[in-house]
Image: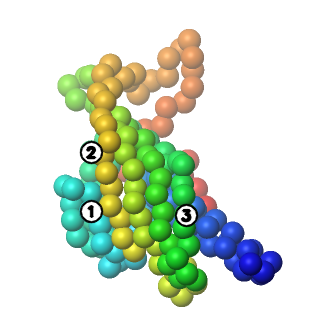
Amino acid sequence: MTMDAAVQELLDKQAIAEVVARYSRTLDWLDDEGQASCYWPDAAIDYGFFVGTAEAFVPVVMAIERRSQRRWHMLNGLIVKLNGPARASTECYGIATGIREEGGAWSGNMYGGRYLDEFEKRGGEWRISSRRYILDWSHPLPNQPGAEPNPDFALPILGIVESGHPDYRVL
């Protein structure tokens, strides 16, 4: 492999990794436009509960995320296999939480699964062209802290309940 080809491979893999990071971040901050930018609109999406295009999926997943007053997604262990100059296959593991307040009690779930993605590079930009999500496990998270920091361990708690949170930065 030439130096130019090796550098291009690294650049492509980094661009793909940034899409994966953007996916988690835009869900957590309720950034609809940022979430849509992770997929090609015609991408085939299969989450089990939803099978269709990314264009139809993004409003569905964002509505689900908005039902949680707190959400947190982390994807890791990303493997990228380039299948040519404009196609790639990836797999990574994900852990996510969704926590909501109902009747004065905070509770939620933690989920673990994997993302099997295909990427396409169109017009110099990498995006997901196909995604299959597989849920491996789910665990209840009862008795979560409320919206106030614990005075003995006073860390800030973000209340992201709609788009446009003042701490959100477009990166």
Q: CA distance from mark 1 to mark 3?
A: 20 Å
- Crowding around mark 1 (Cα neighbors within 10 Å: few <14, some 14 to 19, many 20+) is some
Q: Amino acid at mark 3?
A: Val
In the rendered view, tell whether residue 56 sits above or below residue 63. below
Residue at the far right in the pictured view: 3
Which residue sits at x=56%, y=73%?
82
Mark 2: few/some/many CA within 10 Å (<14, 14-19, 20+) = some
Residue tagged by mark 3?
80
Where the C terminus falls, by quadrant?
bottom right
Tag 1's secondary structure? strand
Q: Residue at x 49, y 32 (%)?
A: 157
Q: Amino acid at mark 1?
A: Asp
State yes or no: discs 2 and 1 in contact (Cβ < 8 Å).
no
Name the spot of residue 9 as percent of width and height, x first.
67, 73
The residue that mark 1 highlights is 46
Amino acid found under the numbered disc labelled 2: Arg
State the image coordinates of residue 26 (x, y, percent, origin top left): 46, 56
Say which of marks 1 and 3 sits in front: 3
